[in-house]
């Protein structure tokens, strides 16, 4: 028997999957860490607007976040003609926090400079 998690439990699961603190997760959607903590503990409602911000920022499937259906993350390459390797890299990149994304961008830029 599968037990569906409540939205606040899915929020905590998502943040854990992303490896982000409440502060860094909240910063990505312009909320405080304490606001995220209150949402995860069910003390504050997760509005549709906040859910939308979470889904856009972290490439989360709205059906999963709001209703517990489908996969946690969306495919950021959906509709593009790209290889499986590119799909995999894009999916992994989309799960990173802002500081890790910046690190990856700098690494790629540095490697590209070496090719010139």
Image (spheres, rainbow, N blue to C red):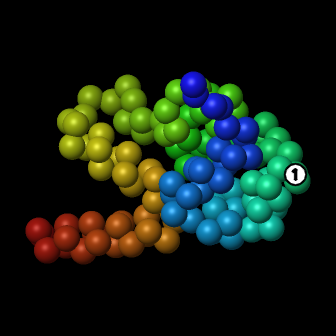
Examine the image and state in which quarter residue 66 appears: top right
Q: Nearer the viewer, residue 47 or 107?
A: 47
Q: Nearer the viewer, residue 76 or 116?
A: 76
Residue at the location (39% across, 30% down)?
78
Q: Nearer the viewer, residue 3 or 87?
A: 3
Work out which quarter of the rendered image holds the N terminus and state it.
top right
Q: Position of residue 62 (x, y in %)?
A: 62, 33
> Can residue 76 be seen by looking at this rendering?
yes
Q: Nearer the viewer, residue 4 or 110?
A: 4
Examine the image and state in which quarter residue 63 appears: top right
Residue at the location (69% across, 46% down)?
9
Q: Position of residue 68 (x, y in %)?
A: 63, 31
Q: Is residue 91 left or right of residue 4?
A: left
Q: Residue furthest front?
A: 1
Quick check: 93 above or below 112?
A: above
Q: Secondary structure at mark 1?
A: loop
User: Callout 1: 10 Å neighbours few (<14), some, many (20+)?
Assistant: few
Q: Position of residue 116 (x, y in %)?
A: 12, 69
> Can residue 31 be seen by looking at this rendering?
no
Residue at the location (49% across, 39% down)?
73
Quick check: 11 above or below 21?
A: above
Residue at the location (65% across, 44% down)?
10
Residue at the spot of label 1: 44
Q: Is residue 103 left or right of residue 69?
A: left
């Amino acid at each position: 028997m599968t037990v569906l998690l409540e939205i606040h439990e899915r929020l905590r699961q998502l943040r854990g999957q992303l490896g982000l603190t409440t502060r860094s997760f909240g910063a990505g959607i312009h909320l405080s860490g304490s606001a995220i903590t209150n949402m995860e503990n069910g003390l504050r409602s997760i509005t549709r607007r906040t859910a939308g911000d979470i889904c856009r920022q972290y490439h989360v499937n709205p059906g999963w976040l709001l209703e517990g259906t489908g996969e946690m993350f969306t495919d950021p390459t959906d509709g593009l003609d790209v290889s499986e390797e590119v799909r995999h890299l894009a999916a992994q990149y989309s799960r990173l926090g802002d500081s890790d994304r910046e690190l990856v961008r700098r690494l790629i830029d540095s490697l590209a400079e070496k090719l010139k």
